[in-house]
Amino acid sequence: MVLVSGSGTNLQALLDAATPSFGAVIVAVGADRDGIEGLARAERAGVPTFVERVADHAGRDEWDEALAGKIAAYKPDLVVSAGFMKILGRRVLDSFPVVNTHPALLPSFPGAHAVRDALAYGVRVTGCTVHLVDTGVDTGPVIAQEAVPVREGDDEETLHERIKTVERRLLVEVVGRMAREGWTVSGRRVRLGRA
């Protein structure tokens, strides 16, 4: 199961990778808004879609419960937040393991403006993180990370594009390994493979 909010480039990388040897099948794609390219990508690939908008509910808790119900209908083993720009609540997080990506080397530069914040800080190296989602903002246990150097003359757009290229590849690698090999969590440590 993949959740999206926008263009769905991470989703497309997963769709492209989802061959029999990958070990995972995308059972559905959910979104928090209508009319986005991520949903169109799923529909073109023949993957079922649904939309669960926050505005259609009395509050975030009701939305979280409705979203958990929609996800549960597809019985996923794993939920991938692929550019899903909503914070997931306890109902979803207590029901499903959720993987997310972040365009920085967590715990540095959490939040929505990671690339801008890294540039403003003057780092020479940043990167991307694939992590399990918990109730905090970009605070879940790290599964994998990869560094991306900051080049002279980089602006937010050029650096973010290089990070996204690495992020897509790393996400596909991690999701494939989780599907094929399983994973265990001990405290803040995530180990890919069976114990």
Image (cartoon, helix red, strand yellow):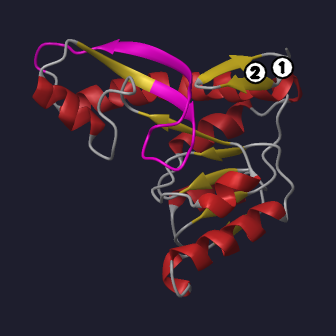
Q: Is mark 2 on a helix, strand or loop?
A: helix
The residue pinned by badge 1 equals 181
CB under 8 Å between discs 2 and 1: yes
> Crowding at label 1, few (<14), some or many (≥20) Cα neighbours within 10 Å?
some
Residue 136 is covered by the magenta coloring:
yes
Q: What element carries label 1?
A: helix
Asked whether, in this view, residue 55 is left or right of residue 174, the answer is left
Asked whether, in this view, residue 91 is left or right of residue 141, the answer is right
Query: Please, what is the three-letter code of the amino acid marked with disc 2?
Result: Arg
Asked if one can make out residue 17 in the rendered structure from this viewpoint, the answer is yes
Residue 163 is covered by the magenta coloring:
no
Residue at x 66%, y 24% (from the top left corner): 174
Asked whether, in this view, residue 50 is left or right of residue 107, the answer is right
Residue at x 31%, y 27% (from the top left corner): 108
- Mark 2 and mark 1: span between their CA atoms? 5 Å
Where residue 176 sits: x, y (%)? 75, 26
56 and 26: which one is in front?
56
Residue 177's label in the rendered image is 2
Residue at x 37%, y 20% (from the top left corner): 127
Q: Give the range drawn in magenta.
A: 129-153
Asked whether, in this view, residue 142 is left or right of residue 146, the answer is right
Asked if one can make out residue 44 in the rendered structure from this viewpoint, the answer is no
Where is the C terminus found, in terms of image quarters? Answer: top right
Where residue 152 sits: x, y (%)? 12, 13
Query: Please, what is the three-letter code of the amino acid marked with disc 1?
Result: Glu
